Image (spheres, rainbow, N blue to C red):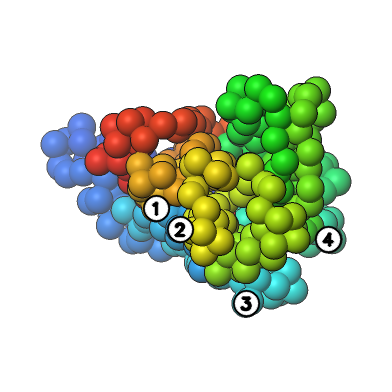
Amino acid sequence: MSLKKTRAGLAALTVTGLALGLAACGGGSDDDATAAAGGDDLVTVGFVAVGPEGGWRTANENNIKTAFSKEAGFDLKYSPATDGSQNSQITAFTSFIDEEVDVILLSATEATGWEDVLGKAQEAEIPVLLLDRGIEPDDDSLYATHIGPDNYSISVSAAEWAIKTFPEGANYVVLEGPAGLSVVNERNRGWDDTMADATGFTKLESQDANWSTDEAKKVFETMLKAHNNDIQLVFAQNDEMGLGAAQAVEAAGLTPGTDVKIITIDGTKAALQGLIDGQLSFVAEYNPLFGDLAVDLVNRLLAGETIESNYVVDSVTFDSPEAAEAALPTREY
Ligand code: AHR
């Protein structure tokens, strides 16, 4: 265990010890212990984030910020990418190493190109946790752990729903997230591997619509025109793009859910409302709420524990308006 981990580990243990001491004397709570530790023993966490991107991203980053609170013993330094650029993330990542933070959290805007800075973090003995987005090639010796839902199996469940819904097959298109992202590659693999065994399905084309409702509407309008509206199914890799495709269907004088069925991934409130209203037909959750798990893993890492290289966050699917109606009142994002 490195000095840094020992220092932070001792800090964590000190706060805990104080808490136990104060509690034993009936002298107070964890807050008192943190205060007694002078607050300057907070574990510093550099969060190399994506930044504003859509409903899922906002929910995920807010959940991380809430979990890594000062009350929980953390000083979280949030650094969103500039215009989604990997260069800005690498600059922030390098700065956090220079600042000698205790831990780095990374949600990568690109899958490749991380070996160098991850190697520098290793040399500095700063553990790195990958949140949501992975790296390619995946070398788990370069990071402490990855936390996120399983994109591959989520896309398999989407494809299995499509095969069940269209027993005679269908013409379909895919609206992808930006090229070069691990989640896009994983979602494509899960879908394509499952559809490979299906009969009667034709993938007419797939295009990047940049996670965006407006871009997805434009892209799908063009696709409908190019294929004389003979498209029965859309696999949209996030909610915003699926809702944009629904707008294109209506603009073409067609009916979403009847003429064109749309699948999305994320499970935001907007998507569940779209399922209730008939714009969408299948919504696969990609659960963004794993901040508490990330905190637990950081605490265990800094206390010198060995943890797994990957933690899958459970996610559910919604295949009917009734399922969405039942879930919507308690949805957290
Ligand atoms: O990496 C997760 C993806 O990024 C989500 O599915 C999408 O909505 C977000 O922008």
User: Which one is in front in this view, the residue at disc 1 or the one at disc 4?
Assistant: 1
Residue at left offset 77%, top offset 28%: 200
Q: Nearer the viewer, residue 186 or 94?
A: 186
Whether ligand 1 has any atom under 8 Å from the Cβ at mark 3 is answered as no
Q: Position of residue 166 (x, y in %)?
A: 63, 28
For the residues labelled 1 and 4, the Cα–Cα distance comes to 34 Å
Whether the residues at callouts 2 and 4 have beta carbons within 8 Å, the answer is no
Mark 4 is surrounded, within 10 Å at the Cα level, by few (under 14), some (14 to 19) or many (20 or more) other residues, namely some
Marks 2/4: CA distance? 27 Å
Question: Of the residues shown, which amino acid type is indicated by label 4?
Answer: Gly
> Could you tell me the amino acid type at mark 2?
Gly
What is the C-alpha distance between the residues marked 2 and 1? 8 Å
> Residue 113 — which label?
4
Circle 4: element type: loop
Depth check, front residue: 52 or 2: 52
In the picture, the quarter occupied by the N terminus is: top right
Viewer-side residue, 181 vs 50: 181
The amino acid pointed to by label 1 is Ala
Any atom of ligand 1 within 8 Å of the CB at mark 2?
A: yes
C-alpha distance separating marks 2 and 3: 18 Å
Q: Please name the residue shown 62% across and 56% down the image.
A: 107
Q: Quadrant of residue 211?
A: bottom right
Residue contact at pointers 2 and 1, CB within 8 angstroms: yes
> Which of the two marks, 2 or 4, is nearer to us in this view?
2
Where disc 3 sits, the SS reads loop
The nearer-to-camera label among 2 and 3 is: 2
Of pointers 3 and 1, the one earlier in the residue sequence = 3
Q: Earlier in the sequence, mark 2 or mark 1?
A: 2
Considering only vertical position in the picture, is 16 above or below 271?
Answer: above
Q: Which residue is mark 3?
A: 82
Q: Amino acid at mark 3?
A: Thr
